[in-house]
Image: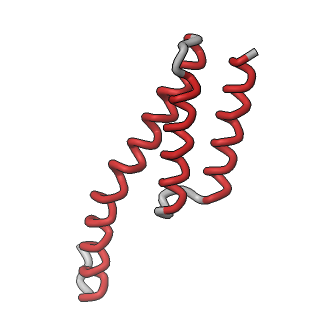
Amino acid sequence: MPIIKSAIERARTNVKANKRNAPQLSAMRTSVKKFETAVTKGDENVADLFKAASAAVDHAASKGLIKKNKASRDKSRMAARLAKAAK
């Protein structure tokens, strides 16, 4: 445990941030995985899942949970998989 007052406050802040950020990051990962499994299975609602996953990735990037470059890379890869599945 920290002894210095500012370190104690920072630790408390980190716990709050983790409680706030972890569910959002988990939701993003879940939506991306749903899209990936739908593409693999060849489901009909792949376009809707792509839209939801893309929005979740954008939301995570806007909140600072992931970097903008990772968001762009993930969306690009999903779009490529969607295009390949549409053929």
Q: x, y percentage for residue 3?
A: 23, 83
Q: x, y percentage for residue 18?
A: 32, 60
Q: Is residue 26 left or right of residue 79?
A: left
Q: x, y percentage for residue 21?
A: 36, 57
Q: Is residue 9 left or right of residue 25?
A: left
Q: x, y percentage for residue 9?
A: 25, 81
At x 39%, y 43%, the residue is: 26
At x 69%, y 18%, the residue is: 85
Q: Is residue 42 left or right of residue 23?
A: right
Q: Is residue 16 above or below residue 84?
A: below
Q: Is residue 40 left or right of residue 59?
A: right
Q: Is residue 74 above or below residue 3?
A: above
Q: Is residue 48 above or below residue 29?
A: above
Q: Quadrant of the N terminus?
A: bottom left
Q: Quadrant of the C terminus?
A: top right
Please tell me which residue lies in front, 40 or 2.
Answer: 40
Q: Is residue 58 above or below residue 7?
A: above
